Amino acid sequence: GLFNAVPDLESPIGEKLAVIQGLPPDPTNLPSGCSFSPRCPYAQEECLEKPCGMREIEPGHFIDCYFPHRYEGGSRA
Ligand code: SF4
């Protein structure tokens, strides 16, 4: 969602930026799983149960997501 919200010089004038639906979670009452799960279009059962945790997917690049491959193909959430 954040990547999709970055404007670029090729976008037509007046084009609306992508938005992430919903609201950020209450920091005093975070979801038990991934904090983004209530707003993530790719959330699955695992996402609701416990946070994934940071893991290195290639040297120096870390990700905190169970399903990072779902963001490939130009439609990142
Ligand atoms: S797919 Fe990734 S970002 Fe989405 S809810 Fe699951 S762990 Fe979180």
Image: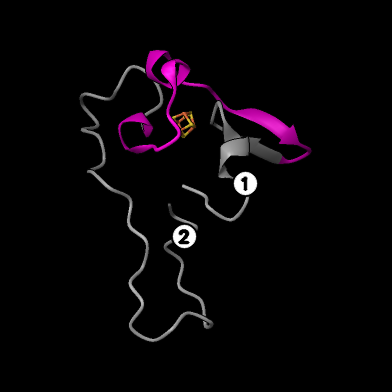
Image point (79%, 38%), residue name: 59
Residue interval drawn in magenta: 36-60
Q: Nearer the viewer, residue 1 or 15?
A: 15
Residue 42 appears in which quarter of the rendering?
top left
Image point (20%, 33%), residue name: 26
Residue 56, given in percent of the width and then of the height, sits at 70, 31
Judge from the rendering whether residue 59 lies leftward or rightward of residue 73; answer left or right: right
Judge from the rendering whether residue 58 lies leftward or rightward of residue 34; answer left or right: right
15 up-or-down from 64: above or below: below
Name the residue that disc number 1 marks: 72
Image point (38%, 86%), residue name: 13
Q: Nearer the viewer, residue 32 or 60?
A: 32
Q: Mark 2 or mark 1: which comes first in sequence?
A: 2
Circle on res. 22 = none
Packing grade of label 2 (10 A; few <14, some 14-19, many >=20) is some
- Under mark 2, the amino acid is Asn
Q: Is residue 32 magenta?
A: no
Name the residue that disc number 2 marks: 4
